[in-house]
Structures are given as structure tokens and as C-alpha cells.
Image (cartoon, helix red, strand yellow):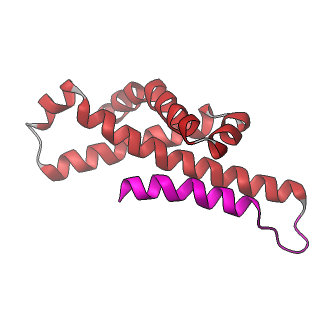
Amino acid sequence: MKKLLVVLAPLALILSACVTTEGTTGSTAATTANGLALAAVKVGVQAKCVTEINNNTYWKTASKLMTETQQTELQTEVCSCVAEKATTSVTAADLVVAAMDKTSQATLAAKVVGNSLNACVVETLKN
């Protein structure tokens, strides 16, 4: 399901960039496309984040002490934080490149997760 979402989100972005309504200015269309691109990146970042957490040795050890519900809640909280940080660390140029190239999209998601995962884990555990 997550893989399907990661594939469909960029497709929706590309298709929506071609759609305009009567009376819409170019800047409004660009803003909408930018928002959709950022949403697509967030989806990719969240998927990458879950994968990175599940592959982490420390997570594997710590998760043995948690219930499945606790694991899911913590993963959701951490990966939501990572996805929100994507909004501040991704440039418009990154979004354009990621919208057109699947490899760039994966690279961008990995970069965002790598830059913010540890900070989000610490932030989540402090709360």
C-alpha cells in the first residue's frame, strides 16, 4: 500500500501541474503545484522514515520492550516530525527535480530523513 502511494503521489503531482481552471493565474497554479509536490515528498519521506526506523539496530532492541501499539504510535510521531521538517529543508528547485525524476525523489526523501530522523527521535522522546 505504501509503495502504491509513493508511486501515485508523484503521478498526481505531474498530472495536476497540467490542470488549470479559468481565471487561475500562473503564480496560483505554481503555488498549487508546489504544494502538491511537497505533499508527494512528505509521503515519500514518511515511507522512507518507517523503513529506516525498522532497519535501525537500536529500534529493534528498544521495540522488544514495547507493545505493537506503542511501536506504531512512536513511529507515527517520529515520522510525522520528519515529514514536517521536510517542509523547511526542501527547496523549490528540489521539488521540481523530484517531480520529474523518480530517482531524485528517492534521493531527496533519503536526504530529508537522514538530516532530521535523529533530531525527531530525540524531540519525541523528550515529550
The percent coordinates of residue 60 (x first, y second) are 16, 32
Task: Judge from the rendering whether residue 84 lies leftward or rightward of residue 22; answer left or right.
Answer: left
Of residue 13 and residue 64, the one placed in the foreground of this image is 13
Please, is residue 36 above or below residue 126 in the view?
below
- Is 17 within the magenta? yes
Residue 18: percent from the left, percent from the top?
Answer: 77, 62
Residue 50 in view of the camera: yes
Q: Residue furthest bottom?
A: 22
Residue 19 inside the magenta-drawn segment: yes
Residue at position x 87%, y 67% in the image: 24
- Image quarter of the C terminus: top left
Q: Main secondary structure of the magenta part?
A: helix
**Residue in the foreground of this view, choosing between 44 and 97:** 97
Residue drawn at x 61%, y 61% is: 12
Q: Residue at x 87, y 54 (%)?
A: 27
Quarter of the image for the N terminus: give it: bottom left
Count the numbered circles shown.
0
Report the front residue among 107 and 64: 107
Up-down relation of residue 122 to residue 7 (above or below): above
Horizontal side, residue 70 vs residue 77: left or right: left
Residue 123 spot, x, y in % from top left: 38, 31
Magenta range is: 1-24
Instruction: Name which residue lies at 24% across and 37% down.
Output: 54
Which image quadrant for residue 13? bottom right
In which quarter of the view is residue 19 placed?
A: bottom right
Q: Is residue 117 left or right of residue 29?
A: left
Q: Examine the image and state in which quarter residue 53 appears.
A: top left
Q: Residue furthest left?
A: 65
Task: Indicate the position of residue 56 as horizontal and vertical percent values.
Answer: 24, 28
